[in-house]
Image (tube, grey):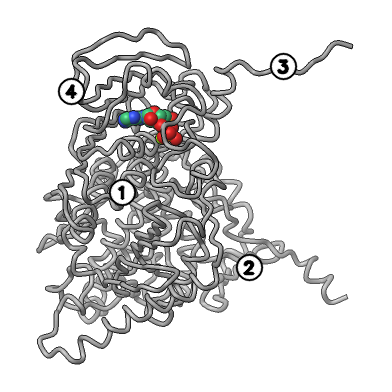
Amino acid sequence: MEDVIQLLPDHVANQIAAGEVVQRPASVVKELLENAIDAKATLIKLIVKDAGKTLIQVSDNGTGMSVSDARLSFERHATSKIKNADDLFKLSTKGFRGEALASIAAISHVDLKTKRPIDEVGTHIKIEGSYVNFQKDIASPKGTTVLVKNLFFNVPARRNFLKSNIVETRHIIDEFHRVALTHPDITFSFYNNGAELFNLPVSNVRQRIVNIFGSKTNEKLVPVQEETEVLKISGFVFKPEFAKKTRGEQFFFVNNRFIRSSYLNHAVNTAFEGLLRPKTHASYLLFLVVDPQSIDINIHPTKTEIKFDDEQTLYAILRASVKHALGQFNIAPILDFNRDKNLDTPYGFDEKIVQNPMVDFDKAFNPFKGQSSLIGSKQSSRGNHINEWESLYVGLESKSNVTSDNFKEVYFESDENQNSMFTDEIKEIQKTFQLKNKYIIHTIKSGMLVIDQHRAHQRVLYEEFLEQITIKEAISQQLLFPLKLEFGMDEINILETLRPQLEQTGFMFSMVAKESMELCGIPATVNNEQALLVLEQVVYDAQNELPDTHFSQTDMLSKSLAKSLAIKSGQYLSSDERDHLVNKLFACKDPTTTPTNQPTFITINVEDLDKKFM
Ligand code: ADP
Ligand code: MG
């Protein structure tokens, strides 16, 4: 038989390599920014359009390339950064594999313009899917500009698997942060869809952090500083009270390279033990310097994982240093009589009066008695709370009357079947019980339903929000005093994108600035205290793409809001509230699952019970 093995042509090999190097637009951004840094640039400009799907451009004022280097730079394993294997252990550059440009050029349209300071003219190369279209002289400033257009044009599977623009932009911003944080000595700018997102002048590390994460960040930082023989640590942790429910800023840099390490993350978290509110995450930006000989960064093609020689020691030193830093900060307020009030009140709520936590509810409320019970004697004593409780299920009453049949057509096609589960007699004596303030037990003809109250309410709210956003506007409560909320610049960007849908649900913005915004109206279902948390969660969910949201912002937003606002398990519900929730659940289009496909209830038949007694 004939021999069957052959060497793959370069363009095929490059495309295969690209699969590892370029997972998404953000990977291109990372490689191009790192190349600019390796070229000793002091000025780097990043331009992104359409989350990098149509354009990623990085311009630098670095060393530039000669005519033949420019051509060679697109060959695989072409690098100026290492010459032999020993060099791997004394790396001072970000790149070294010589794969990035070859990989990128294999799966996109690349335009490279570059000029060295000593050259009269620069060179311009155009490559499409590894094929060089042309190379010619060009008048250009010193440095290099790389344009990457139509990423994955020849790998449709990859292109189709890209996430929404918000998610892909989030990844790009993450990469930009990582690079910009480690190089405060370089001026960076970042334009996203024509708008300037970041403009970072040369500064110290702390100032760079503040420039990236917003001016409020400064007061949140606690410096960490430690120097031992094996490890030098510098950087900052966020004061514990600024810990976020959503994973906040968590950065490790080892020898100025961003790395992921759940092991080191654990070390920091244990240092925070006892200081964080439940379910919140510590934020930190920590720079570790170790002997390059003691680590191996070669184990992952995108180089965010790392192997340390002596992990245990690192863990212990890191944990101790963070603990030490936090300890110093905790003692400070006791000694200092002019207390910094920022230490006490998180989230810039300094001026606000403390209010009871939502959700309060009127135990005597009976939705079937109509409005009259709301305006009854209790209203005067309980005041707003009644309205707040009612607003928990806002629009439930009105939906069936006010909403026209066309909504029914869209969402509730199968009401009849749902109702048939309850026989007429049982309906009259129908009883619900609450178990552990978590489950609602509901008797039905064939046995009973065990309903998860939190999940059931998620389903109800989800369908309500969908309806509000797509069909009708929700009622918005006008705030007497606008609520000022602080966000990062990129978070504001996301809220801007979602603004039309948010307004449909009742969030009204009176002002949106670079790092803050003012709400003049909030949905009837939300109170002032919740507003910030709910919006933070929305931003987080948008950035991380909730499962099954199918790129639909409306769906994502409805899921996110429903999750944040659904009554929690652990909350007592009166019998009317239970009935109400159960009725609302079974009026839903799909009462059986939460919007994220978890079951909302289980059925236990009498036969099942009978078996248990056999
Ligand atoms: P690596 O960075 O691993 O060496 P790349 O494919 O990213 O591999 O780049 C190949 C080579 O092209 C680099 O080694 C460098 O010599 C050159 N190069 C790439 N980008 C630039 C740039 N912005 N300025 C100057 N030279 C560059
Ligand atoms: Mg590189």
Which x, y percent locates residue 432? Answer: 56, 72
Q: Is residue 395 left or right of residue 19?
A: left
Q: Earlier in the sequence, mark 2 or mark 4?
A: 4
Q: Are marks 1 and 2 in contact (CB under 8 Å)?
A: no
Count neighbours of disc 1 (C-alpha within 10 A) and say few if under 14, some if 14 to 19, many if 20 or more.
Answer: some
Amino acid at circle 3: Gln
Residue 177, which numbered label?
1
Q: Earlier in the sequence, mark 4 or mark 3?
A: 3
User: Foreground mark, 3 or 2?
Assistant: 3
**Residue that carries the numbered disc 2 in the rendered image:** 443
Residue 141's mark? 4
Which disc is residue 6 wearing? 3
Closer to viewer: mark 3 or mark 1: 3
Secondary structure type for disc 4? loop
Q: Earlier in the sequence, mark 1 or mark 4?
A: 4
Task: Give the amino acid type for the residue marked by disc 1 in the picture.
Answer: His
Residue 237 location, quadrant: bottom left
The residue lying at 43 percent from left, 70 percent from top is 279
Q: How far apart are the two marked residues, 1 and 2, measured between alpha carbons?
A: 55 Å
